[in-house]
Structures are given as structure tokens and as C-alpha cells.
Amino acid sequence: MSLLEAVGEHVREHRGGLLVDLVFAMAWVTVVSALFALLPSPPQWAYYLAMASGVVAYYGFFWSLEAARAGE
């Protein structure tokens, strides 16, 4: 199996999860970029910190979603 076939198989297998990941990432970047565009002169380190905190927000959101589904 070639690399291209393996990637294609992986994408077919995880299509829904990849789409959710992409939408979350796009929403996070859009919100952070819009927020920092509205601020008068935010420090660059705060922008990078807000972008990096998207990783924590992603895992926190999906962990709480999973916990809520398990509690039903």
C-alpha cells in the first residue's frame, strides 16, 4: 500500500472527526483573530498565547462533551 492510499484510507475512516477538528480550529482562529483585531495594541505574546490555548480549549470541550454524553 502506498503512502497516498494509506492517507486516503485514514481520511475515509476518520472523515467525521477530521471535519469537526477543522471546524473547531477555524472557529477558534477566527474568534481570536477578530478579538485581537479589535483591541487597540495587544502584545504579540498574548496573541500567541491565545492561539496556543486553543489546544487546551479543544481537549477541554470534547472531554466535557464526552462526560456529558456518558452521564445521560
Image (tube, rainbow, N blue to C red):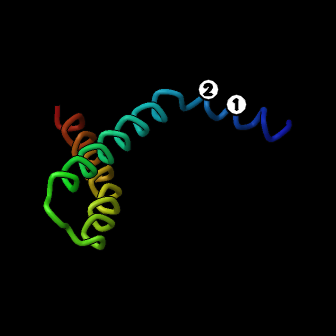
What is the x, y in percent for residue 19?
Answer: 45, 31
Judging by the rendered image, the residue that carries numbered circle 1 is: 8
Q: Mark 2 points at which residue?
A: 12
In the displayed structure image, the side of residue 17 where residue 26 appears, left or right: left
Q: Residue at x 25, y 51 (%)?
A: 32
Contact? badges 1 and 2 (CB < 8 Å): yes
Q: Is residue 65 above or below residue 59?
A: above
Q: Which amino acid type is marked by label 2?
A: Arg
Q: Quadrant of the N terminus?
A: top right
**Which mark identifies residue 40?**
none
Q: Quadrant of residue 24?
A: top left
Secondary structure, mark 2, is helix
Q: Residue furthest front?
A: 40
Q: In the image, what residue type sits under mark 1?
A: Gly
SS at mark 1 in the image = helix
For the residue pair 17 and 29, the one nearer the viewer reads as 29
Instruction: Please report the residue visible at 32 percent of the width from the left and 52 percent of the height from the top.
Output: 59
CA distance separating discs 1 and 2: 6 Å
Q: Residue 41: x and y, percent?
A: 18, 66
Comparing 7 with 40, the one in front is 40
42 or 30, nearer to the observer? 42
Counting from the top left corner in percent of width and height, residue 51 is at 32, 59
